[in-house]
Image (tube, coloured by chain):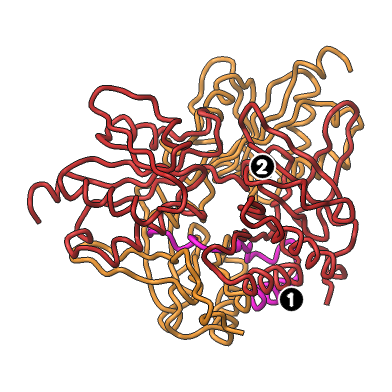
Chain colours: A red, B orange
Amino acid sequence: MTGSVKTGWVKIVGLGPGDEALVTPEVRAVIDEATDVVGYIPYVRRIAPRPGLTLHESDNRVEVERARHALEMASEGRRVAVVSSGDPGVFAMASAVFEAVEEGAPNWRNLDIRVLPGITAMLAAAARAGAPMGHDFCAINLSDNLKPWALIEKRLRLAAQADFAMGFYNPRSRSRPEGFGRALDILREECEPERLILFARAVSTPEEEIRCVTLAEATPEMADMRTVVLVGSSLTRRILREGQPPIVYTPRSVPAPSDPE
Amino acid sequence: MTGSVKTGWVKIVGLGPGDEALVTPEVRAVIDEATDVVGYIPYVRRIAPRPGLTLHESDNRVEVERARHALEMASEGRRVAVVSSGDPGVFAMASAVFEAVEEGAPNWRNLDIRVLPGITAMLAAAARAGAPMGHDFCAINLSDNLKPWALIEKRLRLAAQADFAMGFYNPRSRSRPEGFGRALDILREECEPERLILFARAVSTPEEEIRCVTLAEATPEMADMRTVVLVGSSLTRRILREGQPPIVYTPRSVPAPSDPE
């Protein structure tokens, strides 16, 4: 309840998938007002330096330390933007900040802390391909750094049985090369070989690559850590076009007789 | 392949949940370049009139007719923005346009058609409340206008068994007053009574209301058609604060022994 507690803030903001034209004006305004920006190196590098703004880059996998640093600075009266790529509430910094708040100094709960949404990679990728998430869908983080692999496997099976379209974040990394192959194996057990899969890499950046294949054609090497993988539902379709990539979309309707069970 | 086919376009754009500061610059630029805007009445009313821009408002439930109108105008060389609230690829106009393309005139496939993402209501609501979707999650449209209720029920059960956080779109309308009550009954069969539920109404508008209750406390009347309902996973928590609403968030980690099966 001191003056510094009242004037400092932490705003956890989403920078979207890469293109600056996808950053909301709300987020842009916060970055303009901040005294400090904290985040993972490549995201902080997206922020233009200016006098009065300190950029604090940190490495991957130190999310809670980074969150504590932001909260400490805010409690000293600084205006701190915590930057995430995509949406900060989707497999990004918002949960890490709240974990730090819950375990941290009691006065951190009185701070002005807000989350400002951004365009998440799954929905940016969906927009580029058409509308594969145009019906019910789910999002699963395939990294087993913070959860047991058995839970990922269970969620994959149940999501396939529910006939959700699916978005996979963090499908593959150098330290976990085999997980995504196992995920594909589970999908092959649960879904038909014609099921459509999109590999969307570096969406909205100059390196963007989007590839649409069937489950039968999909291989683990089609994904890396810059890829979000979208799996269609059983109704997801492809519209072929001359000289242009296909449009991939899920219709809005499910006819009653198609209900698989 | 005529000149008009090359110069006209259809861009299906997301206006976000309501606040103009959540409209991406990419979408704003498209609206500035459009000759025509088509959409459901309340969304078209968000667009400022200007010389050279024709606003075409249409009623709810005529999505495919509206899509055909947009495609016809584009094939005559007009620059048409199809506006949706939220993200056009999430229970909105993108799928309707692609249904019209697939069933329509062959030359519609050669048109320049793009989807531009927006902030979807579920993630805007999540940001306001904290980070309830901070772990794996799903999104379900509770309207049974276009799919059998049995499929909704099946997806709810499997999503609860997968321990996803969930976002419900269109939870309740005057024509379907009973569906959301049935959805709550299913959740009560599958989840513990302490499960956290957020009712987020008119997010980011002056009428915004966010309410956090437990599943035991939730009643069907807490939702209407302007509400998005978020259901936590079994790990979603509340941080209580003095004189401020609680922060609701889902931690990033699932400890191995918590795996329910």
Q: Is residue B9 magenta?
A: no
Say how many tags the image has: 2
Q: Which residues are magenta?
A: B129-158
Q: Specify the quadrant that holds the C terminus of chain B.
A: bottom right
The chain under label 1 reads: B
Judging by the rendered image, the residue that carries numbered circle 1 is B150
Residue lying farthest left? A2
Residue under circle 2?
A125
Q: Position of residue A246 (x, y in %)?
A: 84, 37
- The Cα atoms of the two marked residues, 1 and 2, are separated by 30 Å
Residue at image x 51%, y 39%? A16
Q: Looking at the image, which residue is at 31% across and 29% down?
A: A32
Q: Is residue A2 left or right of residue A198?
A: left
Extreme top residue here?
Answer: B3
The x, y position of residue A167, in whole percent, is: 66, 54
Report helix, strand or loop for mark 1: helix
Q: Is residue B152 magenta?
A: yes
Q: Residue furthest front?
A: A175
Q: Which residue type carries mark 2? A: Ala
Give above or below for A238 relative to A100: above
**Front in this rendered view, residue A49 or A247:** A49
Residue displayed at 78% across by 68% down? A186
Badge nearest the viewer, 1 or 2: 2
Q: In the rendered view, would you say A150 is above or below B115? A: below
Tag 1: Cα neighbours inside 10 Å, few (<14), some, or many (≥20)? few
